Image: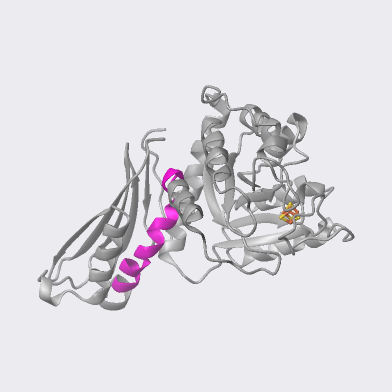
Amino acid sequence: MSVATTTPALPIPHSKSRVKAATRTLRELGIVGHALASTHHVVMAQIVPMRFCNLSCAYCNEYDKVSEPVPVDEMLRRIDHLAGLGASIITISGGEPLTHPELDAIIARIRHHRRVAGMITNGYLLVPERIQQLNRAGLDHMQISIDNIEPDEISKKSLKVLDKKLEFLSQHAEFHVNINSVVGGGIRNPQDALVIGNRALALGFTSTIGIIHDGDGQLKPLQDEERRVYYQMAGMAKKNYSRFNKFQEAIANAIRHADPARLAINVEYEDSLVRLKVIDDGRGFLIRGDLLGFGIRGMRKRASEINADFDLMSEPGVGTTIAVSVPIRKRINLLVRFDPANTFRKSIGEI
Ligand code: SF4
């Protein structure tokens, strides 16, 4: 039996979802700024409240059929501790998290600490009422991995089985949903990943692709077709802020060499690009190609690898500005400014 191939109109998010998406974006840009400004705290952590799983994927060694749920008090203690360590994003994983009886309290505790709450699930237990409970608990992100179109002996995380759940999510979820498809490790038809990715985008979700390991946890080299599908899918995936990770060097350089009294990190979100600016009022230098250090050359190279524009302005005794502009799809206009004298200001331009 084939999966529905009709493509419904892209769902129009209702106003509550749009407001939630806007505030989520704002919180996450704050995390990007915090992560760029300091490498001395945990950015992301995964917690496992439930090792039991209702499925038995052949390649998986991260579940069992006997474990009891970790008591909720213990989970709350762990979340409090992670918050104390400065963890910005806490993702609930498993086993299958939706089988934990106190999952909503766990999500709510993450949000109580103003952290981003994510969850990785196989999606089997999602029904409209459960999705609405997750909305109320404050879930920010959900990821569902779908391995194939038709269930087989390797995996039952299949579009055929989960398509109805995806429709429920498109109708009721106020959180962001990402559908991850896979190639490699026993996945019979690599082309399934493209069907799954297109279905995810048609429903208004984001879509990513991963390379799956085999039952021994080993990655095998991708065959030609798998590689083609992987790169095609990677091109379809919505980009994320991780591309700016590569420019932490600009901040490290400014602190290490420029001796600035003031260092500002601006992230400007415009119609079709995100621009990161690192501005210091330190020593500055004469810009001469033959005198540029490896750090600057490396950043310029990395910018060209992701089709970003790289601008460098510097004047001795005045300071240095490094700007990286990354093209994106239009989603929302947002302007956030960080002033990392450890009190960063945020200002919203237009939502
Ligand atoms: S659904 Fe996830 S946790 Fe469960 S067996 Fe499959 S891969 Fe493992």
Q: Nearer the viewer, residue 130 or 185?
A: 185
Q: Position of residue 81 (x, y in %)?
A: 69, 66
Residue 260 visible in image: no
Horizontal placement of 62 versus 204: left or right? right
Q: Residue at x 59, y 47 (%)?
A: 189
Q: Position of residue 181 (x, y in %)?
A: 58, 48
The overriding secondary structure of the stretch rendered in magenta is helix
**Vertically, is 137 above or below 234?**
above
Q: Nearer the viewer, residue 94 or 30?
A: 94
**Vertically, is 128 above or below 186?**
above
Q: Residue at x 19, y 73 (%)?
A: 283
Horizontal placement of 279 versus 14: left or right? left
Q: Position of residue 126 (x, y in %)?
A: 75, 37
Does the magenta run of residues contain 183? no
- Span colored in magenta: 235-253
Colouring mode (rainbow / by chain / secondary structure / one colour): one colour
Q: Residue at x 78, y 60 (%)?
A: 63
Q: Position of residue 245 (x, y in %)?
A: 41, 62
Q: Quadrant of the C terminus?
A: top left
Q: Residue at x 65, y 29 (%)?
A: 167
**Vertically, is 2 above or below 74?**
above
Does the magenta run of residues contain 243? yes
- The image quadrant that residue 215 belongs to is bottom right
Q: Nearer the viewer, residue 12 or 153?
A: 153
**Vertically, is 103 above or below 13?**
below
Residue 241 visible in image: yes
Looking at the rendered structure, the number of numbered marks drawn on it comes to 0
